[in-house]
Structure formats: structure tokens, C-alpha cells
Image: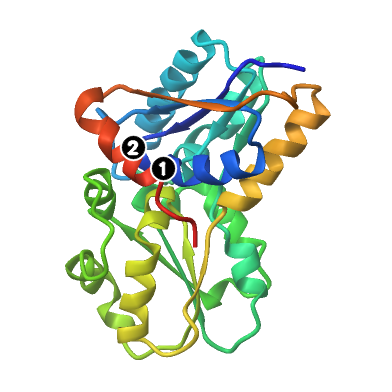
């Protein structure tokens, strides 16, 4: 029985979408969430900056006595997971874009993978993509601008149309079998993104994200390392590098948003 908290990290509020799944799956665990909201978004930064910011965030959570660390940020994973795993004394679990289940979905149409510019550019995602049976089926869209809106708690249908138009206009009318939400912020905009695709494209536009798989992996890692807290009442602590009184209501709103 290990009552120490699990650290969940994202550049900002996106990781709250993974925290929701982790809480459901592991209700007895204590979680400490850290959003580096002051420095978000990470997606337009260089690999070196993302690595440095993620390392500082990991140090912050380790100082809070976490027994395991979850990178609830696809962008941070791309830039830092190998180095953090070598460096840290606690297990590190990380999310990455769910293109594998999306590509396994039967169909003749495209898989649209929406992520940050950094995730789509960096070597880790490129290697993952190359392992797919038909990488040319995947359209990779690295988007700037969506994260900042979700950071303000904006998730409604229609709220991202201008941004999505700027990236997706060349594909209007194509068949979208699947849409991968390859940034944890986009999970909160999932309803709006799917509604947009249904208006602009053909096909089933089925959404995929890596949150549940990552939460399950966290459960396995806790078991394997003897770190489970099987009888606790479960808690969530919010910490941020940003303005906590302003950000807390957004955190609470997103944490309590129903999961589709
Ligand atoms: N939520 C993060 C991700 O999953 C990144 C957002 C950002 O800071 O650009 O990629």
C-alpha cells in the first residue's frame, strides 16, 4: 500500500482530460496535477525548450513526493520521454497519439491526425507513423492556436472553425474514417472537432485519443512496481506555474466535464 501521489503533468489544461480517465480507473489513488500554464503552449516551441520545461516540471512533481509520473502531453512526450526515463528514479508513463487504433479501423478513407506543430514534426512521432501499415493514409496536421482557446475553457462547437478552416480547407470533401486527437487539449474540443468534420468531410469521423490506454498503462505500471494504493479515498490536488486563482475554475470545469 503506497499512499504517495501520482504526478500528472501537462503544459496546461489538456492533461486534465487524462486525469479524468485515470481517476475513474484508479479511484483510490491520490493525484497531483501540474499545469505549466505560464509557459503554455509548448507546441510552437523548439525541442530543446520543451525538454527543458518538461524536466523542470518533473523536478517540481518529484519534490512533491510523487511515486510515478504521467506525461499527459503528447508534445512533452515527443521531446523528452527517453531522457526522463533514464534520469528519473520513479516510473514515467506517457501519452502518444493514438494512430495505431485509428489506422486499424477498417475503411478506404483517411485518418486525420491533429496535434501540435512540435508533435507532428519530431522524430518520435515520425517513427511511430512509419510503423503503421500504410502511413500515407494518415494526414498529419500540426495546429497552432487551439490550445490557447482550451486554456480559457473554450470547447463549444463552432469555436474552432476559423483555425480548422486554415489547416483543413485543402481536404474539404475527403472521406475521414478517423480523427486522432493527438494533443490532450483537443480531447476537450473533440465534440467541436467532430461536428466540424461532419460538416466539411465525408465518412464516419470516429474520434480516437490515447487517454484511456495511458490510464490503463499507469495501472499496470503501479501494479508491476508495487506502488498501488488499494484502499485510499482518492484525491486531486491542482498546482500550476500560472495564476492559480484564475485557473482553478477552468481546471474544475474541465475536470468535471462528462467523458464521452
Ligand atoms: N496538451 C499538449 C499535448 O498533448 C500540448 C499543448 C501545448 O502546450 O501546445 O500535446
x then y, percent, for residue 115: 40, 56
Which of 90/142 is in front?
90
The circle on residue 33 is none
108 left or right of 59? Answer: right
Mark 2 closeness class: few <14, some 14–19, many ≥20 residues within 10 Å: many
Say above or below: 117 vs 138.
above
x then y, percent, for residue 257: 40, 51
View quadrant of ligand 1 = top left
The residue wearing badge 1 is 255
Can I make out residue 213 in this image?
A: yes
Q: Quadrant of residue 189?
A: bottom left
| Label 2 residue SS | helix
Say above or below: 91 vs 77.
above
| Label 1 residue SS | helix
Mark 1 closeness class: few <14, some 14–19, many ≥20 residues within 10 Å: many
Disc 2 under 8 Å from ligand 1? The reply is: no
Q: In which quarter of the image is residue 129?
A: bottom right
Say above or below: 198 vs 5.
below
147 left or right of 175? Answer: left
The circle on residue 251 is 2
Q: In which quarter of the image is residue 82?
A: top right
Disc 2 vs disc 1: Cβ atoms closer than 8 Å?
Answer: yes
Q: Distance between the residues labelled 2 and 1?
A: 6 Å
Name the residue: 52% across, 48% down: 123
146 left or right of 22? Answer: left
Name the residue: 34% across, 76% down: 195
Name the quadrant of the N terminus: top right
Disc 1 under 8 Å from ligand 1? The reply is: no
Can I make out residue 41 in this image?
A: no
Amino acid at each position: 500500500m503506497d499512499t504517495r501521489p501520482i504526478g500528472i503533468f501537462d503544459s496546461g489544461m489538456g492533461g486534465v482530460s487524462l486525469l479524468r480517465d485515470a481517476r475513474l480507473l484508479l479511484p483510490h489513488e491520490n493525484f497531483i496535477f501540474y499545469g505549466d500554464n505560464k509557459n503554455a503552449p509548448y507546441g510552437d516551441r523548439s525541442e530543446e525548450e520543451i525538454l527543458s520545461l518538461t524536466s523542470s516540471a518533473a523536478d517540481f512533481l518529484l519534490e512533491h513526493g510523487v511515486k510515478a509520473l504521467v506525461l499527459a502531453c503528447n508534445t512533452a512526450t515527443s521531446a523528452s520521454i527517453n531522457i526522463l526515463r533514464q534520469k528519473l528514479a520513479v516510473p514515467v508513463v506517457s501519452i502518444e497519439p493514438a494512430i495505431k487504433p485509428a489506422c486499424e479501423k477498417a475503411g478506404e478513407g483517411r485518418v486525420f491526425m491533429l496535434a501540435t506543430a512540435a508533435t507532428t514534426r519530431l522524430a518520435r512521432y515520425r517513427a511511430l507513423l512509419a510503423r503503421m501499415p500504410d502511413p500515407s493514409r494518415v494526414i498529419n496536421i500540426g495546429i497552432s492556436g487551439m490550445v490557447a482557446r482550451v486554456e480559457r475553457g473554450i470547447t463549444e462547437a463552432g469555436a474552432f472553425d476559423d483555425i480548422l478552416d486554415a489547416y483543413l480547407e485543402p481536404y474539404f470533401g475527403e472521406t475521414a474514417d478517423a480523427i486522432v486527437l493527438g494533443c490532450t487539449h483537443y480531447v476537450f474540443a473533440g465534440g467541436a472537432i467532430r461536428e466540424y468534420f461532419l460538416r466539411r468531410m465525408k465518412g464516419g469521423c470516429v474520434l480516437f485519443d490515447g487517454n484511456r490506454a495511458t490510464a490503463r498503462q499507469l495501472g499496470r505500471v503501479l501494479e508491476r512496481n508495487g506502488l498501488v494504493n488499494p484502499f485510499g479515498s482518492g484525491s486531486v490536488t491542482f498546482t500550476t506555474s500560472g495564476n492559480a486563482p484564475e485557473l482553478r475554475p477552468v481546471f474544475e470545469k474541465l475536470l468535471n466535464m462528462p467523458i464521452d
